[in-house]
Image (cartoon, grey):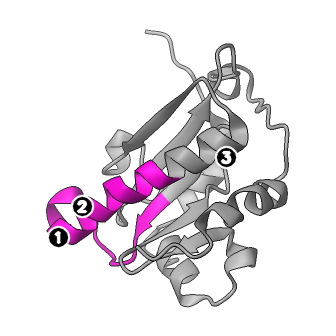
Amino acid sequence: MDRLWTPWRYAYVSSVGSADRGCAFCDILASGDDRQNLVVYRGKRLFVVLNLYPYTSGHLLIVAKRHIACLREADDEELRSFMELARICEDALAREYRPDGFNMGFNIGRAAGAGIDRHLHMHLLPRWVGDASFVSTVSETRVLPEALGQTYARLTPYFEGLAL
């Protein structure tokens, strides 16, 4: 059996969301500094934040405000809001980054790849034909053409005035 190692992710998966450190998403919600925490939108039931360890530029996370672990714990309004906000995020990313496609989804539980496994969140990643999808797995290298602050500045205007 071949193994692909991703040692660059160890610090992330071993620290965020751990029992002794609390929940990174709850900490972000408790903070009032959206710019510092890279929160591009706060809604009634969900918020949108940049991934601190993005796979591509524009990698967004839609996060439940309630500390719930999986979809079966979400109420109907939260579920609807996830899809409505995913559509808004897709549109913002499409307009700003002009990707060739998207990856969107939930990693529910640590075994499914969730770095923060006790707080429900959805990943949205713009993708381009020929992008460096597996470079970080194979060569421990990521190719990101812009800093998170630039991504924040580019995407925040798409959420101004949104009331969801």
Residue found at x 67% / y 57%: 52
Determine whether the residue tagged by mark 3 lies in a helix, strand or loop. Answer: loop
Label 2 belongs to which residue?
79
Q: Amino acid at mark 2?
A: Leu
Name which residue lies at 85% across and 37% down: 145
Q: Does label 1 or label 3 sit earlier along the sequence? A: 3
Dot label at residue 75: 1
User: Which quarter of the rendered picture does the C terminus lie within?
Assistant: bottom left
In front here: 101 or 119? 101
Task: Determine the secondary structure under disc 2.
Answer: helix
| Residue 46 at x, y percent in the picture | 41, 71
Q: Tell me where the magenta segment starts and ends, as one range.
A: 62-88
In space, the residues marked 2 and 1 are separated at their CA atoms by: 6 Å
Q: Amino acid at mark 3?
A: Gly
Which quadrant holds residue 30? bottom right
Specify few, some or many for label 1: CA neighbours under 10 Å numbering under 14, 14-19, or 20 or more.
few
Q: Position of residue 12 (x, y in %)?
A: 61, 54
